[in-house]
Amino acid sequence: MPIVMLLGPTAAGKTDAAIALAERLDCHLINMDSTQVYRGLDIGSAKPPRWLLARHPHALIDIRDPAEPYTAADFVTDADREVRVALAAGKTPVLVGGTMLYARAFRDGLAALPRANPEVRSAIEAEAESQGWPKLHARLAKVDPVAAAGIHPHNGVRVQRALEVFETTGRPISDYWKAQKQSPATERLGGRLLEFAVIPEDRATLHHRIEARFDAMLRAGFAEEVQRLRQRPDLSPR
């Protein structure tokens, strides 16, 4: 039984492609979007509407509160479980989404890293808000030049994680990368992994689709959704 991944840029039509598959095959749809895992981020994440989810359920949607961290490692653990559920039921697992970090982590596997430390993470985030991520990237370069060389100074998520691991354990994250053998999906789960990309006709078409989607989001109440989230004292502006 193959394991299918549907990838593509924002507004390319990944959900439509997944639904088309589900209409023809006995599929188990698995969300692979890093924002759709969160409850309350419905409009901004372009989450499938409730009526569509009722007809074609997607695993790993609405599984976290926005205040709760969810890492690529968490995703791989959850996605592996859902794939096994699908295969045991004789269904085709279809992972759909545009979060490439999740896609690579699922396909290639991850080195075993320490779990997230919310206190350290919050402290790093506060520093970034006052100093900027490039300043923290420079700090990372001093303690872990190998990791820093592969992380863009403005990639806050990866800079934060690398500093978090170092400050929590005293070891550079690059040491964990070198010490741990990655386990690809085909080894963990068996079977074949089929990757498909949903690609628009051209860049102009994609830009038009993105603009149309954003206009629809505004009409649906995107600004109000953001305002509700900003009013929560337990959420960072980032």
Image (cartoon, helix red, strand yellow):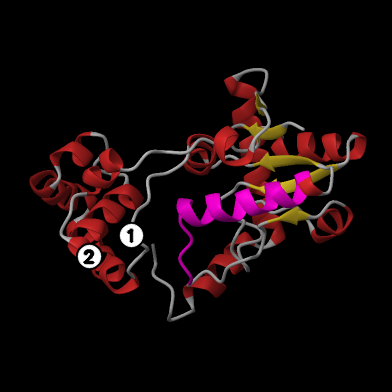
Residue 58, how many percent across, how many down? 75, 53
- Magenta stretch? 68-87
**Numbered circle sitting on residue 80:** none
Give the structural element (helix, strand or loop) at label 2. Answer: helix
> Residue 112's x, y, as percent?
37, 51
The prevailing secondary structure element of the residues shown in magenta is helix
Q: How many numbered callouts? A: 2
Q: Which residue is mark 2?
A: 168
- Position of 32 with respect to 49 (left or right) is left
**In which quadrant of the rendered image does the N terminus lie?**
top right
Mark positioned earlier in the residue sequence (2 or 1): 1
Amino acid type, residue under disc 2 in the picture: Thr
Q: CA distance from mark 2 to mark 1?
A: 8 Å
Kindly indicate whether the residue at mark 1 contacts the one at mark 2 (C-beta within 8 angstroms). yes
Q: Nearer the viewer, residue 116 or 37?
A: 116
Location of residue 77 by image quarter: bottom right
Residue 238: x and y in percent read 39, 62
Amino acid on which disc 1 is placed: Pro
* Residue bearing mark 1: 114
